[in-house]
Structures are given as structure tokens and as C-alpha cells.
Image (tube, rainbow, N blue to C red):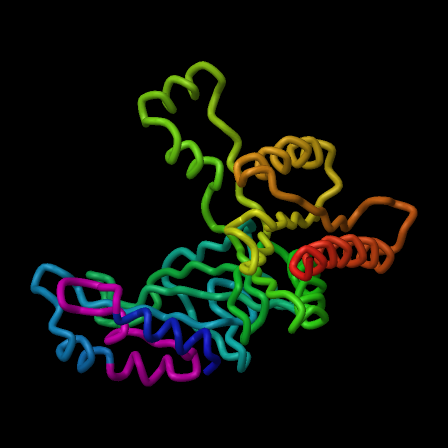
């Protein structure tokens, strides 16, 4: 178990399945131990002392290889069937591929019509790897993050570079911080609902005043004109929402005449230049 999973186990003590029942008491964080968890489910439930009006349940949290035919494909290639829905972020499937790693959160319990303890439903989201649980939207983002991590190592000791993966709408947060709900409703009625603004990554430089040197990193994974038109609007809007900070794009389709290795080099060199500028400012 890596440090991130150990951290999740610690944090699970602060979340509750029911009154006085912390998640940590009913957490299975290793699919290899799932059968043992199911076998001991009744004993764990009695020890947890669920209220009479709440059916005992637990949580599965681990990384997996993918999903196939209603089952989770675990890292040891075993299958864990899910009785109900498997929700997969941003797609209809989660195929097993050499690079695929997914974080799964599943609900363990019993249907009212069955005495069998099982996985009732699950949510699956791509992550970087079984050791790095940062959520990503695609394998393209894994490629972007790999280059970022290489630069983090290159500049280690010269400047601190943190990577943040926002999960909520930064534009909505800005609106909430600056105008009332009533005024926001009026603006939405007048101009339409604002664009959802969720950067792919934000590089943070904690040695500078909060946010001033941050960089938005966008992975451009599609070539569709509508997608590109949307990015032309949302990227400047995200910059504005975060105080006019810099932004950089990692393109996986353009220029079309270039190989992807050349596009990767272009992105890496541009990002290196931006980091160098911040290193020089630190030294001045």
C-alpha cells in the first residue's frame, strides 16, 4: 500500500457511513482481500453498530485495470462482479489496456431481496497509476503529467512546483465569492449560464505570493472544431477567473505535419521556459 492509500485510510476515519460509524470501520482498500471482507461482513457490521434504520454497508476503494461485462478487472486479473450500475467518468467503458489504471469506489452491501453480500454499484475514474492516485480525464492527460513530472525532477532544488488537479468549477467559485445568489440568477437569465471552468492542471509555485505565478496547463486531446472553439473561450476565461495567470497547451493533434514526439518537445520546451522565468525571479 502506497502513501496515498495510507492517507486515504487515515482520512476515512473522519467520514461517516452512519451515526458513529466511520468509513474506516467498513473499508476494503485492497481487492485481493475482498473475499475476506465479504466473509467477515456480518461480524464487521455488528461491531460497527449501525443504527436500526440503516442497512449495513461498506466501501471498496482500490485501483483496478478496467471494467468488462459488469465486473471490475482487478490488478491481479481477478474479476469482481457488480450487481448494479458501474458509472465510468466521461465514457461508456473502461477497457483494460497496458497503461490503464482506474480508481474505483464501490458500495458493498445486500439487496433487500437477497441474503448475498456483494458489490451493489461502483464509480470508476481514470488515475495516473496504482501508485499515483491523481485523477486524470484521459491517457492524453497521463502524457501531459509525465512531462510535468520530468520537469519537477529537473528543477528540484531550484524551485518548488506543485501540481493540482481541480475537480470543481473555478468560475462558479469566483461568482460565489463576488456576487449574491440573486444577482447570479439575474446574470444567468440575461446572458445564459456561464461556461463550466475546470482546468486540466494548475502548476503552483508556493515560493511566490499565492496564485501569482501559477500556470494553467490544458491537454488538447481532440481535433474537433467545436472542441477547439470551446477551448478558445474557456482557457482565457479560466485565466481571468484565477487573476490573469499564465496558461499553456499540450496539443495532441496540431500542427498536423508534426509527429507527437515533436509536439511533446514543443510543450516541454515552452513549459521549461516558463519555469526558468520563475527561477530567475526567485533569484533576483
Instruction: Reply above or below: 155 against 141.
Output: below
Q: Residue furthest right?
A: 257
**Residue 144 image-quadrant placement:** bottom right
Q: Is residue 34 magenta?
A: yes
Q: Is residue 136 visible?
A: no
Residue 235 percent across, percent down from the top left: 63, 38
Q: Which residues are magenta?
A: 14-40
* In-front residue for pair 53/219: 219
Residue at x-position 57% and y-position 34% = 240
Residue drawn 43% across the image and 83% down it: 32
- In front: 248, or 157? 157
The vertical placement of 182 against 4, above or below, is above
Residue 235 belongs to magenta span = no
Q: Relative to 48, is 64 on the left or the right?
A: right
Percent position of residue 273, x then y: 77, 55
Q: Is residue 261 visible?
A: yes
Q: Toward the viewer: 138 or 76?
A: 138
In the image, taking residue 229 as reference, residue 26 lies left or right, namely left
Q: Is residue 136 left or right of residue 2?
A: right
The percent position of residue 16, horizontal first and vertical second, equals 22, 64
Q: Residue furthest left?
A: 52
Asked where in the image residue 44 lies, by quadrant, the reply is bottom left
The C terminus sits in image quarter: bottom right
Numbered label tally:
0
Lateral position of residue 51 relative to residue 101, left or right: left
Q: Position of residue 136 (x, y in %)?
A: 57, 58
* Position of 221 relative to 62 (above/below): above
Task: Check the image and name the residue furthest to the front.
Answer: 284
- Give the residue at x 82% y 44%: 254
Task: Name the residue at the top extreme.
Answer: 190
Which quadrant of the view contains residue 275? Answer: bottom right
Amino acid at each position: 500500500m502506497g502513501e496515498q492509500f495510507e492517507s486515504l485510510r487515515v482520512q476515512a476515519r473522519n467520514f461517516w457511513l452512519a451515526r458513529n460509524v466511520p468509513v474506516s470501520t467498513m473499508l476494503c482498500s485492497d481487492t485481493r482481500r475482498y473475499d475476506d471482507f465479504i466473509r467477515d461482513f456480518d461480524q464487521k457490521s455488528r461491531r460497527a453498530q449501525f443504527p436500526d434504520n440503516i442497512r449495513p454497508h461498506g466501501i471498496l476503494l482500490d485501483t483496478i485495470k478496467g471494467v468488462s461485462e459488469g465486473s471490475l478487472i482487478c490488478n491481479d486479473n481477478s474479476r469482481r462482479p457488480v450487481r448494479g450500475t458501474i458509472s465510468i467518468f466521461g465514457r461508456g467503458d473502461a477497457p483494460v489496456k497496458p497503461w490503464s489504471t482506474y480508481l474505483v469506489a464501490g458500495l458493498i452491501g445486500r439487496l433487500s431481496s437477497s441474503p448475498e453480500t456483494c458489490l451493489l454499484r461502483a464509480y470508476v475514474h481514470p488515475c495516473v497509476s496504482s501508485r499515483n492516485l491523481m485523477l486524470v480525464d484521459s491517457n492524453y492527460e497521463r502524457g501531459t503529467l509525465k512531462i510535468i513530472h520530468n520537469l519537477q525532477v529537473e528543477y528540484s532544488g531550484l524551485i518548488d512546483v506543485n501540481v493540482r488537479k481541480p475537480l470543481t468549477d473555478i468560475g462558479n467559485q469566483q461568482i460565489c465569492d463576488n456576487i449574491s445568489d440573486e444577482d447570479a440568477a439575474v446574470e444567468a437569465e440575461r446572458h445564459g449560464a456561464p461556461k463550466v471552468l475546470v482546468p486540466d492542471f494548475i502548476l503552483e509555485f508556493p515560493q511566490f505570493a499565492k496564485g501569482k505565478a501559477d500556470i494553467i496547463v490544458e491537454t488538447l486531446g481532440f481535433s474537433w472544431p467545436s472542441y477547439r472553439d470551446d477551448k478558445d473561450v474557456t482557457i482565457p476565461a479560466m485565466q481571468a477567473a484565477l487573476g490573469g495567470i499564465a496558461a499553456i497547451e499540450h496539443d495532441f493533434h496540431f500542427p498536423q505535419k508534426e509527429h507527437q514526439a515533436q509536439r511533446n518537445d514543443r510543450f516541454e520546451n515552452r513549459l521549461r521556459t516558463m519555469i526558468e522565468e520563475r527561477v530567475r525571479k526567485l533569484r533576483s
